[in-house]
Image (cartoon, grey):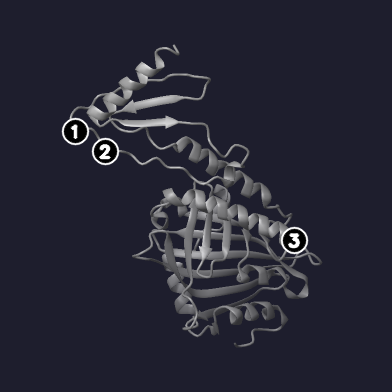
Amino acid sequence: LRRRIPALLALVASSARRGGLGLRIARPPSSVGTPLWRRSPRRCAAPAMTTRRHAILHATVSFSGLLTLSAAGAAAPPNAARDDDDIASARRALLAAIPATASGAPATNATLSPTHAARIERLAETLEVLARPTLRNAASDRRLDGAWRLAYSNAPEITTLTTLPLGFRLDAVYQPVDLAGLSFENQAAVGNAAIPFARGSTRVVGDLAAVADNTNRLDVDFRRVIFALESPVRLRRVVAPKRDPAAIRPSITVTYLDDSMRLTRGANGALFVLVRGAASESTAFAPLTRDERAELYAETKRADEVVAGAGLRNWSTTFALGGPRRS
């Protein structure tokens, strides 16, 4: 076999020159010992198809288990299997790093140690880099539809709600999306450790708009925010967020998406790691219908106007203490 290798190599090279065949030599990866999620994705450029003839020649020679030759009318496809393995490993590492909470509340950089939060965000960035080459038209991908539970975020609008007055705390946060209706909501449950029967909720209702120059991004127009106390007494207050003209327009950019997990970035770069809810959760946290939204907007034409951002966060944290203060 060793005596025939030079002749076989010459035959493959000659056929490649005559027919325009792609020649690829696969070697062991140079990143041995490096965690899969830290490797940069490798791609092989596909050579032009042969114009003289579509010869197909496959030669596989094993020499100490390290040499593989493949020549064909088109180059072998990129090493998609290894790329998929890297993405799957990065995905598992990210989810494993995010701790679950008894109340279902998302983990945040305000509730975790700086070291732990930094590790989560580093793993998220690694997954985003690996997924970037294949992420296309995510903003119109039907997998976005449904109710998503927030697992981790470092967004100020989330971290501020981790410390509420009168013993209230943030519980589970869901983000239902309806691409057909271009609707988007953030729904959060609020509980109280000292008074278990005291429950409340917040619901942010917004409209989505496609972005012509970025098929992975959707602009968001927040229309109403509903604060409700459901027990022991029932209270409901609605606020109309007013966008600060000097602020960046709210948006969500999808940086990773599969059937059960997605990563998005806010306009300010804040990270949101979400996992798909069960079928029962999708029903329980479904967004308002088109008619319900129209009714809400008509009902609250004179809703309190609060500048989005810090003003809205101050409004929410003072609501339980006797009503909003205008910002």
What residue do we see at 46% from left, 42% from top? 42
Precedes in sequence: disc 1 or disc 3: 1
Q: Residue 247 versus residue 323: which sits nearer the camera? A: 247
The answer to whether mark 1 and mark 3 are in CB contact below 8 A is no
SS category of the residue bearing label 3: loop
Where is 156 relative to 300, above or below? above
**Residue that label 2 marks:** 48
Task: Tell me where residue 178 appears, x and y as whole percent.
Answer: 44, 59
The residue furthest left is 52
Residue 75 seen in the current view: yes
- Displayed quadrant of residue 103: bottom right
Q: Is residue 58 visible?
A: no
Relative horizontal placement of residue 72, taking residue 78 as reference (left or right): left
Q: Position of residue 152 (x, y in %)?
A: 63, 58
**Label 2 CA crowd tier, 10 Å (few <14, some 14–19, many 20+):** few
Front position in the image: 164 or 256:
256
Residue sitting at the far bottom:
326
Work out whether 92 lies above or below 18.
below
Residue type marked 3: Ser
Q: Quadrant of residue 23?
A: top left
Q: Secondary structure at mark 1?
A: loop
Q: CA distance from mark 3 to mark 2?
A: 52 Å
Q: Which residue is mark 1?
A: 51
Dot 2 lies on which element? loop
Residue 89 point in image, percent of width and height: 58, 42
Question: What kind of residue is marked 2?
Answer: Ala
Mark 3 sits on what residue?
113
In this rendering, the answer to whether 80 lies above or below 207 is: above
Front position among marks 1 and 3: 1
- Residue at the outermost right position: 194
Q: Amino acid at mark 1?
A: Thr
